[in-house]
Amino acid sequence: MDTAQLTALGQQLRVDSVRASAAAGSGHPTSSMSAADLMAVLLANHFRYDFDRPAHPGNDRFVLSKGHASPLLYSAYKAAGAIDDEELLTFRELGSRLEGHPTPQRLPWVETATGSLGQGLPVGVGIALAGKRLDRVGYRVWVLCGDSELAEGSVWEAAEHAGHEHLDNLTVVVDVNRLGQRGPTRHGHDLDAYARRFQAFGWHTTEIDGHDVDAVDRAYGEAASTLGQPTVILARTLKGRGVRSVEDREGLHGKPLPDADEAIEELGGIRSLRVHVQEPAAARMLHSVPTGPLVLPRWEGEDREKGVATRDAYGEALTALGAAREDIVALDGEVSDSTRAEAFAKEHPDRFFECYIAEQQLVAAAVGLATRGWVPYASTFAAFLTRAHDFVRMAAVSGAGINLVGSHAGVAIGQDGPSQMGLEDLAMFRAVHGSTVLYPCDPHQTARLVAAMAGLDGVRYLRTSRGAAPVLYGPDEEFPVGGSKVLRSSDRDRLTIVAAGVTVHEALKAAEALDGEGIAVRVVDLYSVKPVDRATLRQAAEETGLLMSVEDHHEQGGLGDAVLDAFLDGRPVPRLVRLAVRTMPGSASPAEQLHAAGIDAESIAASARLLVEQAIAP
Amino acid sequence: MDTAQLTALGQQLRVDSVRASAAAGSGHPTSSMSAADLMAVLLANHFRYDFDRPAHPGNDRFVLSKGHASPLLYSAYKAAGAIDDEELLTFRELGSRLEGHPTPQRLPWVETATGSLGQGLPVGVGIALAGKRLDRVGYRVWVLCGDSELAEGSVWEAAEHAGHEHLDNLTVVVDVNRLGQRGPTRHGHDLDAYARRFQAFGWHTTEIDGHDVDAVDRAYGEAASTLGQPTVILARTLKGRGVRSVEDREGLHGKPLPDADEAIEELGGIRSLRVHVQEPAAARMLHSVPTGPLVLPRWEGEDREKGVATRDAYGEALTALGAAREDIVALDGEVSDSTRAEAFAKEHPDRFFECYIAEQQLVAAAVGLATRGWVPYASTFAAFLTRAHDFVRMAAVSGAGINLVGSHAGVAIGQDGPSQMGLEDLAMFRAVHGSTVLYPCDPHQTARLVAAMAGLDGVRYLRTSRGAAPVLYGPDEEFPVGGSKVLRSSDRDRLTIVAAGVTVHEALKAAEALDGEGIAVRVVDLYSVKPVDRATLRQAAEETGLLMSVEDHHEQGGLGDAVLDAFLDGRPVPRLVRLAVRTMPGSASPAEQLHAAGIDAESIAASARLLVEQAIAP
């Protein structure tokens, strides 16, 4: 398109943004209007995409990091012929695909859900990594950011990652309209301030007037021809551009225009320009076929005697899975020697991504890789996954299929103390919509679950432990997600101990001691924390009357609450006792920690004795 | 101290770090050895601190951001005479104050708990803000960072904040030893790479050899005399410096030295130099006295008819609290128009801190301000507080007293969709050690809780709602933390509905409808989600036999689980039903959202009918 056409298209996108927001009675038209020319030029002259085949491997990828500018995105879809005008005006209605913030759960052309600022670029870096290092089919990744969101540290984690990986297939466009939600941004229209920052992180930068369509056009061309560096285009724009009553004015964020009809007239009225978006180059994906049978590791002989840490099992199992499936990739937060992901890195270096100590970027890159069909396993300490909570939450909104693995769970890590102990991770991951939460206690169980995770939907979390523990299960035993294992059971059981991970071993020792005193207890290994094995828990409740959960986690939101999931439909609930970490731990040996927290075998046995006595009393 | 003495002191700190780690059998001596000269020069020639009076308002403040280098910190304490050699060798033992990572819960000279990397600088910025804008007694803030942790986005949020606020009372020393845990960092010994980044964010930078004590000494002097900018000293160092078998070698992170005796000999043997740390200047704190009686806002007349949003009540109550107490400060994540913190900003601009869209920095700055005795209220959308989860977790390890307020909770926000809905916040905050979680439904209740929060220990969380709701309570009603309100009750109740926030109003409507059908139900407003009112819940269970929780939150870890807290000691548990958000919402009106999630009055009534019928059936 030429200058006049591009200018007209920009105005059309503004008009349609105003119309959609007016129809909804809410939305962010002014944030859309500032970026309308940027979007028009991209769509008409640079973006290569087949809207009829969003899964086309050669398609460019566009991420609207400033997700609140969704009216602009949907107006662009209309201009591209992907949706019609009638649908555009369903914006923000119940059941409409056109949500307040775009999500791939509703729209096939959306790569990742946005709306929590500072996430679009981090995920875009993940997609660009896939493009550059794995897919290699030449697509470009375009990310449209707001200026406000550059205050998020996640943006600079992503900038560092992209600069370091020389992602020249990535172009970021920043719509510097100088106004955030509440008022002016830190840097206003000081484009140089942003340029200095991106340059320092190894980026090529261009500064332009974001309403000069020819300048925008040249900048996109320059970005595409820049080699060895990602490019950021810093575009000076005005919020509400084109309508005098709102242009560059504070206090109008997230509000429909006061007079939509007047605004539409001022913008030149309703247009119906149709953009013929360039076709992507022919391409085929290379990684869709598993390459061989899965041979999981087996721990026998000496290992059985010495015990094996579940983190070790994770590293070995993931490596085996990577050998069987070429679509498996691994990501590390600079602790692969601890999480044992280093085993995968050694065997499959081309599919290993070092994200350094940047957990938000770790998870975002995983989401980005998943959008391109890769099956990511991202691991760090369980405690540090809390750093990425908002990214995990948004991954669930996206419906992204990612595997997250947290090691060094609980007080059982010992001397390093509370800063390194994952004690909130089960609560965090259980509350994520559609998540799966797994917590193995044994290497064979770990290996099976690592393999099973790959085939699940949504966010999958596996919790591993630092220390070696006895091998409880055989290499051929199966561990369905949603299942559990009854490790001790008799018809004389007077109590059921529900444990997972490190507490399974403590529970077994306690049960053995209690048995010597004539108190029979059942022990359930609840390795699938979500979904939970309701049938087994209900049967245990019926047969033993009393359940005691034991977990190396704070008492809220973890294993104890998971047990309750079996009883929350109005049926009679068994009596329940919860042993969990209730104090703030300090440094101590693993055994001392478990004892101080009251979750070791001795503490379990003492609580069990008390409860059984109470149950006998009237 | 002169060059020779400083060099000897550096060696002493190395030797003591090696000895402490050897005694513990774990720890991070090599990470301590790289920074030993930096620490020696600071302690001997620049740090002004009274170890006998850690609360002295004029004391400089030191933050060990690389918290794993705790042996170095404790060795410095010994050199300053704060601890003796015997205590040094209790490092990492059960009950010792000298934990694997330092925390102020154990040691009075530690400002904030570290060990999750990338948090020391953000908190240090908060302390420096207090020094510069509030305390104004001339203390300096010194932060020792590792190079690995500069990959964390939180560091750049903090760098941006400090640069923008011209915090020339802040000096950051980066121990660039080029080796992370797993191997080399991204930038190795490229000091310029770090300098470019900090300069871009508005910092003064110096690059030195971190083992040249004279250069280190000059750099500290230069930092102290630099005005208008924070300073970062980028120090080239070697991990394990001084012991040939470990110096600058990979694979030795977090491990005691292979031969401690030999290393000590190589380092010149055990010394007992004693540093006389400079006294701080005389100073007094200005903000410790409340200035007047608290007059909380009242909502009467027209407000009662139109209804009031709890976020509005938060803004007004906080403003009133700020008028009564000069130690109250407020922080915003660039959404103060939405959270209503803007009311405080208008009345008390000198105690208002704009953190822009950087939630990690928002919480870290609050922690920093709290260390200096200020009482911070930091607010943003509930959903976006997930961004700061790791900072909240570490605030609990610190025992920091901070108030966090999350607005726009739940599906009730309406059209903006799931990215903006706090649906995991109750689970996140309940699982934080020692936290308080409050969720009001009414403006008078909100105001009372806002005031009560100020006097609590630990992390306090208040959840507010976007939409206006009926005024249920009078302005003089009291709402103790740990309490609840029984809003409907009779001796014919067949079910108790437990609600909080927006669902209280829905529950009341449902109860009214059910009453018309001859079904009496009790309604409890459980505004104190943690701690929970056990007595009231147990009485309701005894009297009505059946509890139904209703929450605008995912079903895990929230209100429903809080109800269970009353019954987890082995006593009989009532039958329970949980209504919560089980699906991924899209855009829709608030009323449509509540209905789609099955938590509106109609859904509550329908579930209640079914349950009461079941209870009648055999």
Image: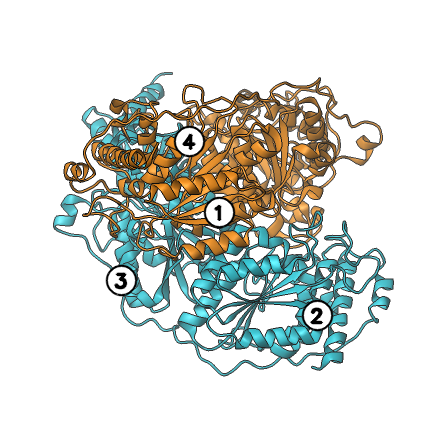
Chain colours: A orange, B cyan
For disc 3, the neighbor class at 10 Å (few under 14, some 14 to 19, many from 20) is few
Which kind of residue does numbered mark 2 sit on? Asp
CA distance separating discs 2 and 1: 34 Å
Mark 4 nearby-residue class (10 Å; few <14, some 14–19, many ≥20): many
| Relative horizontal placement of residue B463, taking residue A8 as reference (left or right) | right
| Pointers 2 and 4 in contact (C-beta within 8 Å) | no
Instruction: Give the amino acid type for the residue marked by disc 4 in the picture.
Output: Pro
Instruction: Say which chain tag 2 marks.
Output: B
Horizontally, is B86 left or right of A13 in the view?
A: right
Q: Is A215 or A417 nearer to us in this picture?
A: A215
User: Is residue B271 found left or right of B123 in the rendered image?
Assistant: right
Q: Given the image, what chain letter belongs to the residue carrying mark 1?
A: A
Quarter placement of the N terminus of chain A: top left
Which is closer to the viewer, label 3 or label 2?
2
Q: In the image, what residue type sits under mark 3? A: Lys
Answer with the quarter of the image where residue B605 lies.
Answer: top left
Residue with the mark numbered 1:
A155
Of tags 1 and 4, the one toward the viewer is 1
Q: Position of residue A419 (x, y in %)?
A: 60, 52
Q: Which residue is mark 3?
A: B346
Residue A542 in picture, x, y percent from top left? 53, 22
User: Between disc 4 and disc 3, whose residue precedes?
Assistant: 3
